[in-house]
Amino acid sequence: MKMTSDLKKCFVEFFGTFFLCFTILCCVLLNTGAGAILNPLIIGLVLAAVVYAGGPISGAHYNPAVSLGIFLIGRMGSKKTLLYIIFQIFGAAYAALMILFLSFAIDKTVTNLSIAPLMIAEIIFTTLLIYVVMFCAVSKRVNGNNYFGFAIGTSLTVGIAAVGSICLTAFNPAVAVALGLAGVACLKLVLLTILANVIAAFIACGLFKLLNLDDIEKVEIVGIDEFIRK
C-alpha cells in the first residue's frame, strides 16, 4: 500500500511527537540518573534531533500549538493543520501508553501547582518556542538555514530549566495530554496547560505578524521543509 505525501507527513508528526513525549515521560517518571540539571538538556536534544530528522518531510511541528500558530499566520491550510494536531495527539497518547508499561508502579501525579504561576510560565515559554520556530524555520529571511533544529531544541531546554518547579513545562498541548494520560498531572493542570499553550500560539502569531509584515503572503507553506528544499 502506497502512502500519500500528506499521510507521510502526518506519520512523521506522529513519530516525532511520540519520541519527544516518551523522552519527557522517561525523564519525569523513570530514575534515569540524569537529574534536574541534565533532564532539560536531554529533552532539548531529542527535540532538536527529531526536528532535523522530520523537518524536510513535515516541517517538524510536533506540537499542536506550533501547528496552530503556523495556521494563524497563513502558512498552512485548515485541513492539514487539523490532521497534524490529530496525529500529534495520537503520538502523545502512544508515548503515555508505552511509559505506563515501564512505570506502572510509580506514583508521581502532580496536583498542587499554583494556577497563576503555571499559566504565566507556560504562556511565556510556549510563546518563546513558537516564536523561535516561526523566525528560524518559517520566515523567508532565514531561507535554507541549518541551525533551526538547534535553536528550537535550545528554547525548550531553557524553558524547562527556568520554570520546571512552577509548571508542567509542557509548552506543547500534546505533551500535556501525555503527562495526563501517564498519570503525571491531574486533569485540571493538564487543561490549564493546554489553554496556556493555545493562548501562546495567538501571542506568537501576533508577534510574527507585527515583526514580519513583509513575510505574510496568502500562500500555503508547510514549514521547515519548504525552505530546506530550496
Image (tube, rainbow, N blue to C red):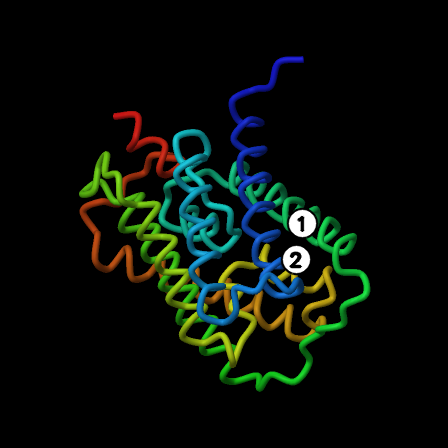
Kind of residue at disc 2:
Ala
Determine contact: label 2, label 1, CB under 8 Å.
Answer: yes
Residue 216: quarter of image: top left
- Give the answer, above or below, for where 105 lies relative to 215: below
Using the rendered view, name the quadrant where residue 210 is placed.
Answer: bottom left
Q: Residue tagged by mark 1?
A: 95
The answer to whether 168 is drawn above or below residue 152 in the figure is: below
Name of the residue lying farthest toward the top:
1
Q: Residues within 10 Å of mark 1 (few under 14, many from 20)?
A: many
Q: Is residue 213 left or right of residue 162?
A: left
**The C terminus appears in which quarter of the rendering?**
top left
Amino acid type, label 1: Ala
Residue at left 71%, top 73%?
A: 108
Q: Quadrant of the N terminus?
A: top right
Q: Residue at x 48, y 57 (%)?
A: 43
Q: Where does residue 183 sit, x and y in percent of width and height?
A: 74, 66
* Residue at 44% from the left image edge and 29% from the top image edge: 57
Q: Nearer the viewer, residue 200 or 142?
A: 142
Say which residue label 2 marks. 178
Spot occupied by residue 32 in the image (x, y as percentages of width and height): 60, 61
Q: Earlier in the sequence, mark 2 or mark 1?
A: 1
- Give the Cα separation between the discs numbered 2 and 1: 7 Å
In the picture, measured across the screen, residue 32 lies left or right of residue 69, that is: right
Percent coordinates x, y for residue 14 in the rendering: 59, 40
**In x, y percent, where is residue 84?**
55, 41
- Residue 173: which quarter of the image? bottom right
Q: Secondary structure at mark 1?
A: helix
